[in-house]
Amino acid sequence: RLFDGSAWNFENKLSLLHAELYFLNQCHTMAELSYQASISSAHERRFLHEEAMAQELYGIYLVENNMVGRGVLQLELAIGKYEKWGAMRKVDSLKDFIELVNLSNNAWRSN
């Protein structure tokens, strides 16, 4: 009931929760659609930090499912949103994570 009256506030959060559940259950098409819906909804409502979080989690999902290039792109988009929001520790953390992802990906390719 609470959601019915507040769809504007909760739609992106619900889509993100669905995305994470689909990820856990290996429902990849639905996971991707739900991450994208969450990002889009947060963007439309100008929830900058929630858009960043959805992009970050989508990026991690993509990296974990061997779509590293797309994942890094999402993580970089998240960094831009976090920078606008002023979350510089989060920015630094994600930059470190991207560096590790790139190192791991390059090491895997060279073997």
Image (spheres, helix red, strand yellow):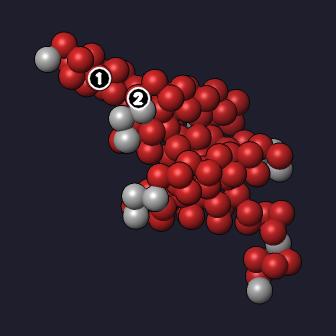
Residue furthest out toward the top: 110
Secondary structure at badge 1 equals helix
Q: Is residue 18 visible?
A: yes
The location of residue 16, given as percent across then percent down, is: 59, 58
Say if 111 sits above or below 38 in the image.
above
- Residue 110 position within the rendered picture, expressed as x and y whole percent measured from the top left: 19, 13
Q: Amino acid at mark 1?
A: Asn
**Numbered tag placed on residue 105 in the rendering:** 1
Which residue is more in the foreground, 97 or 88? 97
Asked if residue 100 lies left or right of residue 30, the reply is left
Amino acid at pointer 2? Val
12 and 49: which is toward the camera: 12
Quarter of the image with the C terminus in it = top left
Residue shown at 29% from the left, 23% from the top = 105
**In the rendered image, the vertical position of residue 35 relative to residue 73, given as above or below:** below
Element carrying mark 2: helix
In this view, the residue farthest toward the bottom is: 1
Residue at point 42% right, 32% down? 67
Characterize the local packing of mark 2: few (<14), some (14-19) or many (20 or more) Cα atoms within 10 angstroms: some
- Residue 100 coordinates in the image, percent (x, y): 31, 26
- Specify whether 4 is left or right of 98: right
Mark 1: few, some, or many residues within 10 Å (few <14, many ≥20)?
Answer: some
Q: Nearer the viewer, residue 1 or 88?
A: 1
Q: Nearer the viewer, residue 97 or 23?
A: 23
Mark sitting on residue 68:
2
Q: CA distance from mark 2 to mark 1?
A: 8 Å
